[in-house]
Each structure stands twice: as C-alpha cells, then as structure tokens.
Amino acid sequence: MLHDAAWTLAEDIFGAARPARALYPLESAMDDLGRAARDIAFAETADVIALHRITVLRDMIEACRTEIARSQDPKVALELAAAIDGLGEELSSFEETLPLERAFRADQRDHAVARIEAAQSRLRTFIETVGMQPDLFDPALTREEAVELAMAALERSPAQIIAAARREAEARQAGAPIPMPEGSPFHFTQPEGWMAWLAARIAERVGRGMTASPSQG
C-alpha cells in the first residue's frame, strides 16, 4: 500500500509538471537561456578545434623540418620535403578560411548573448514582481522554489557563460577533466541543468511524502 501511495503522490506531482502543448513562461525562459548557452558552447568548441588544427599542422611541419636536418638518407629527406609541401598547402587553406570561420562564430556568439540577456531579463521580472502569478511556472513548485531556480540561472552573466564554455572546450581538446560549476552539481546554463534541479526537487518532495505517509498492513 505504501508503494501504491508513493506512486500516486509522484503521479500527482509529475502529472502537473508540464503543460500539454507548451512550456510555462518561466520554463520557456530557462529553456531559451540553456539553448543559447549551448550554442555558445558549440561556437567555442568549434573555435578551439579550428585553432588546434592549425597548431597541429604547424607542429607537424616543424617536426618534418627537424627530421630532414637529422636525416642522412636523401630519399627520406625528399619524402619529408614532399610531406611539408602537402601540409603547407593544407595549412594555408585553413589559415585563409579561419578569419571567415571566426567571424561567423562571433555572430553566433553575439546572437546567443542577446537571447541570454532577453531570457535573464524575463527571469528578473518574475523575481522582482511579487504579485506575479505563480502559474507562470511549473505548479509542482512553490513560488519560493521557482524564484530560487530563477536566481540560480542568473548567477552567471553572458560573459561568464562564454568563459566557462571556453574552459570546457579547451579541457575537452586537451583531454583534461571538465570544470564543474562551483557550489552546485547542476549547470543551470544548459537545458538539462534546470530540469535536473527540478527533478531533484520533485524527488525530494516525493520522498518527504513517502516518509509522512503512514504504512498500512
């Protein structure tokens, strides 16, 4: 019976957790924020990869030149010289297109920043307007919980989101551990971040309901 009661409580909470056809307004703001931050992450990752690609080609060319200087075999030296020519052409092509690529990513970044600023403005309005209707957000949450979630999503400015995305991209490129947000297990600037926060709160509430429900034999 306790099992049935627990699932009934969970169903009541999760059943109201999302409207049938659209996101609640505050959910929409959180979703817009996360998707814009994800676009920034993609742009920063692409930029790191492009710069790394050029660095690798330059290093390969330099390594070939070093081997030519060391080699005593004319045939090997000719093969390395041919490799340098091929790598040089590839490098020139990448260097030629790099400014255009970076300009395109800068436009993507600027557009994403504008979306983040708009989403954060909507979140601030909700926080600052005491009489704002609670049904703007998931009814499974109290207004206090919704405000707490909105405030967490405002902790990072667009510039901080860009810097964090860059650090993550560089860490991935280097095969290093991914930096985690301080003081929270969730990335609130990613769509799954606020969803994970919401799921944790709902699970906590279900757990409290199970503890409070009397067991029946």
Image: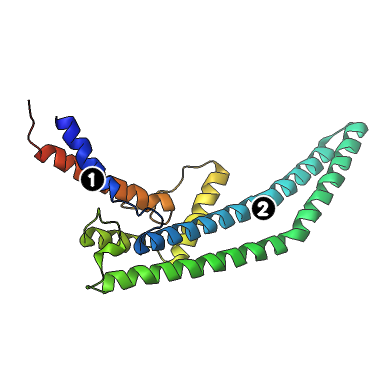
The quadrant of the rendering that contains the N terminus is: top left
Write down the residue under mark 1.
12
Q: Looking at the image, which residue is at 74% across and 49% down? A: 58
Outermost residue toward the front?
20
Checking the image for residue 92, the label placed there is none
Q: Looking at the image, which residue is at 48% across and 57% down? A: 35
How far apart marks 1 and 2 lie (CA) works out to 49 Å
Residues at discs 1 and 2 in contact (Cβ within 8 Å): no
Is residue 185 at least partly visible in the picture? no
The quadrant of the rendering that contains the C terminus is: top left
Q: Quadrant of residue 154?
A: bottom left
Write down the residue under mark 2.
50
Between 202 and 6, which is closer to the camera in this rendering?
Answer: 6
Helix, strand or loop at mark 2: helix
Q: Is residue 106 above or below residue 178?
A: below
Q: Quadrant of residue 216?
A: top left
Q: Looking at the image, which residue is at 21% across and 58% down? A: 142
Between 100 and 10, which is closer to the camera in this rendering?
Answer: 10
| Amino acid, disc 1 | Asp
Q: Position of residue 86 (x, y in %)?
A: 85, 45
Q: Is residue 2 above or below residue 131?
A: above
Between 189 and 179, which is closer to the camera in this rendering?
Answer: 189
- Mark 1 and mark 2 lie on one chain; the one further toward the N terminus is 1
Give the crowd class for mark 1: few <14, some 14-19, many >=20 residues within 10 Å. few
Q: Position of residue 93 (x, y in %)?
A: 80, 55
Is residue 113 at least partly visible in the picture? yes
Give the crowd class for mark 2: few <14, some 14-19, many >=20 residues within 10 Å. some
| Amino acid, disc 2 | Ala
